[in-house]
Image: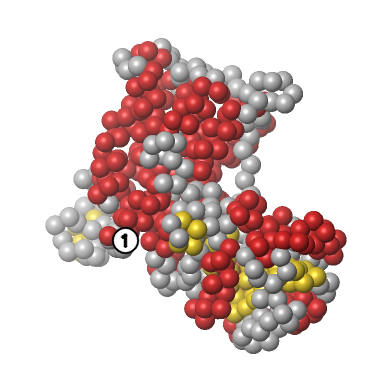
Amino acid sequence: GRAQIGVTGLAVMGSNLARNLARHGHTVALHNRHADKTDRLIAEHGDEGDFVRTESIEEFVAALQKPRRALIMVKAGQPTDQVIEQLAAAMEPGDIIIDGGNALFTDTIRREHALRERGLHFVGAGVSGGEVGALEGPSIMPGGSVESYKSLGPLLESIAAQVDGTPCCTHIGPDGSGHFVKMVHNGIEYSDMQLIGEAYDLMRRVLGFDAGRIAEVFRDWNGTELESYLVEITAEVLDKSDPQTGGPLVDVIVDAAEQKGTGRWTVKAALDLGVPVTGIAEAVFARALSGARTQRAATKGLAGGTLPTVAEALGGHSETEFIEDIRRALYASKVIAYAQGFDEIKAGSDEHGWGVKPVDLATIWRGGCIIRARFLDRIREAYTSNPELPSLVLDPFFRSAIEEGLDSWRRVVAAAVRLGVPTPGFSSSLAYYDGLRAERLPAALTQGQRDYFGAHTYERVDAPEGKKFHILWSEGGAEIEA
Ligand code: NBP
């Protein structure tokens, strides 16, 4: 075969990645279950590079140079397993199968192990950036063997987004690590979007701004350290008029957010790992609440209590000051979202022995992906100067950023609570921060209760860590060593 790489699954993502590869001078074999998509791609974009049209999987595999590199871009789940099986049956030891779909990382671990037994390399690669990213340069997070990356890495790096001459693609670690970090990336994306939504809602409901005016604020913010793809598109979405009524488009969109599952997976994995990703969880649940349309229709008349006036809730602060407060609250909450996401990545990496380097993610998320932001340069600096940072909030830069924004953050959450505007993202991130920095937590009481009803024991502040005690609650109340 003469193709350097093949792509099977030519819906929007697969076609765009194939075109991106061809535009970078690689010969690309094309395959799709139904050949109509293959033919359409060649008819519409065949002149963009060197494509090899194939119809059967056998023909597709035969079109590839050895070791063969085949990228699967089909629907995640069962279809991916089917295509892997077809490819594996036609391939030879040393060949590389890449899954660029949104696979659950545990599926990737299973697939990698099964294919390794058969002498094949399996690379689970997270691809972020949506369809535009796939065509113009995505952020790519490949997991799998070091050997497979030697062969595949240069190809993927050539089509990835580039920031300051550095590709937004690097080897993440073994088996499921690439899909795991892509999953957490999406969790952070959920959180970031929720926080932006809350900032919008406060301007709308507290300050009474219309969509166009809020768009202006977001455009201003995009000139600050909040500069990011999501803030930029927020301004564009808010500025868009409805082709039917001429009013703001956002005002005619049903306020029920949908989700495909990666946010939910991030939270499920975090629950299993015991990592408090509270901001991501609130974002996933906020989408669930918004989507509970029947329940919301039934509960619309519920009382909100005695609310202060806006002026009272703002405590003498001006509109301009409140906007600056919201900006700082957004920034601080965003630091928490990333801190929690990076904590989950560290916990996942430790659990599976992946050796994922946080600095790598901060580097390859700077371009191509949905959460790309100026901010990531700072995270990169943080993990460069201290790869073992116990939490992002302890990095001197982020620490002082939070400390400078803290009063604003509290004012925003307090005003929102008093006015009955829900800000689960801002509020839970602040509670998380206050929990982290607390001298003592009520967990001491929790341990006392657990010892009372279940003899679960407790540790003492004045005894060595790990030494367990128990009170004989119903037998006189003496303390014993457990
Ligand atoms: P879809 O997820 O819509 O999948 C459509 C493709 O899967 C078509 O090529 C279809 O072939 C093929 N397919 C199906 Br469905 N069942 C198959 C089977 N049993 N055997 C072989 N092929 C089968 O495509 P997409 O939106 O381009 O996404 C591809 C992957 O990339 C997904 O895993 C997605 O989660 C992931 N992803 C998507 C985005 C995004 O922004 N859309 C971003 C990042 C990652 P057919 O034409 O013959 O029906």
Would you say 320 lies left or right of 155 here?
Answer: left
Reply above or below: 158 against 416. Answer: below
Q: Nearer the viewer, residue 302 or 1?
A: 1
On the image, the x and y values in percent for residue 419 come to: 43, 20
In-front residue for pair 303/392: 392
The answer, for residue 259, to whether it is visible in the render is yes
Q: Which residue is at 55% across, 38% downward?
A: 233
**Residue 72 appearing in the image:** no
Please indicate whether residue 5 sits to the left or right of residue 329 in the image: right
User: What's the residue at 39%, 32% (across, down)?
Assistant: 327
Q: Can you give x and y, in whole percent of width and height, for residue 452 in the image?
A: 31, 51
Q: Secondary structure at mark 1?
A: helix
Q: Amino acid at mark 1?
A: Thr
Q: Position of residue 109 (x, y in %)?
A: 56, 72
Figure quadrant of the N terminus:
bottom right
Q: In the visual, does 298 lie left or right of 198?
A: right
